[in-house]
Image (cartoon, grey):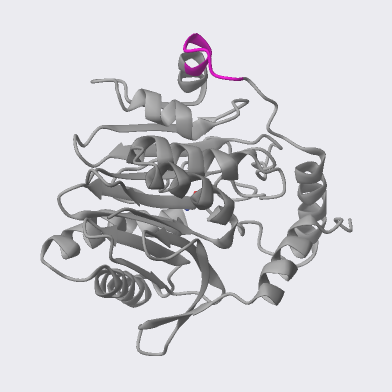
Amino acid sequence: MWGMIATWRMAAEGVEKGCQILKEKGNAGDAIETAVREVEDFPYYKSVGYGGLPNEEMEVELDAAFMDGDTFDVGAVAALKDFANPVSIARRLSHEKVNSMLVGEGAEKFAHKEGFERKNMLTDRAKAHYRKRVKEVSQTLKPYSGHDTVGMVCLDSQGKMTAATSTSGLFMKKKGRVGDSPIVGSGFYADSRIGGAAATGLGEDLMKGCISYEIVRLMGEGIHPQDACEKAVAKLDRELKERRGEAGDLSLIAMNHKGEWGVATNIEGFSIAVCTEELGVTVYLVTRQEDGHCTMEVASQEWMDNYMKTRMAPIEE
Ligand code: GLY
């Protein structure tokens, strides 16, 4: 049994590549790194890697993480500038016994020393988005929107599980702001004996529930990934609303060591990409019901075509 699940439709091409590796009995580390890199490299996804949206100083600062569910090795980078594939740097860091999470200049120094590819990650398109947003913010819009992290969980045929994330974080964030994505237990978690989970949404709120760990913990009690995701998301959403008056976007995916998977969200418009031994790469649209349960339908071809068209449409400034 093998499989991979990821946040957002943007992960589909990556999941396809990753699953090819799994099909050929490759390992969950290589599969997930390959899958995330594919998303990082695609310039039209504006919340991950190359083409990611900048902070308020017009710099692209990236966060990424990798976890090996056999050994609990974790590596992460945060506020990293000018490197092409943050997830690969995070994976390399996961082999370090200490200093395995690095931020800013320290992370860049490590990446340079280890020979990772330097790249200016700020595209003309991202600059255009920035200029447009500056104009909109001066009129009506809130600055902090757009935080579509790619988060993935992977199971290989040897039973190893991994989790990984990559994001440019909140659009217009303060320089140095770090969200949940590189924080173990919040943005991601993997335990090959149980399963893994990964998050997308508002990092500041996801972190308050250590929600990826919470989902893995629930799966460890024998709860199906779907119920574990729904339970954890509903609880955090409710508690945030009770204690703070509002809850940010919270969307989670999970897979257990048997290849069963689940998803939950508190927003409209969440999508996921999944692939297992039985199921070819499939994009699902997730709808949250009043009672917190989430239903899924396979994305239509029309939806898929429209998605790409919107992503690649010219930006009207
Ligand atoms: N979930 C991504 C972030 O808040 O940075």
Highlighted magenta segment, given as a residue range: 111-117
296 falls in the magenta region: no
Give coordinates of residue 290: x percent, y percent: 41, 90
Q: Quadrant location of residue 240?
A: bottom left
Give coordinates of residue 99: x percent, y percent: 31, 21
Q: Quadrant location of residue 211?
A: bottom left
Q: Which residue occupies the extreme top position in the image?
A: 113
Q: Which residue occupies the extreme left position in the image?
A: 221
Please name the residue shown 78% across and 58% down the image.
138
Give coordinates of residue 140: x percent, y percent: 75, 67
> Is 49 located above or below residue 207 in the figure?
above
Instruction: Residue 148: tell me if it is visible.
Output: no
116 falls in the magenta region: yes
Q: Is residue 219 left or right of residue 170?
A: left
Please name the residue shown 43% across and 70% down the image.
247
Q: Nearer the viewer, residue 238 or 197?
A: 197
Q: How many marks?
A: 0
Please name the residue shown 32% across and 28% down the image.
94
Q: Which residue occupies the extreme bottom position in the image?
A: 290
Q: Is residue 51 left or right of residue 283?
A: right
Instruction: Residue 253: tell me if it is visible.
Output: yes
Q: Nearer the viewer, residue 33 or 143?
A: 33
> Is 160 located above or below residue 1 in the figure?
above
Q: Nearer the viewer, residue 86 or 205?
A: 86
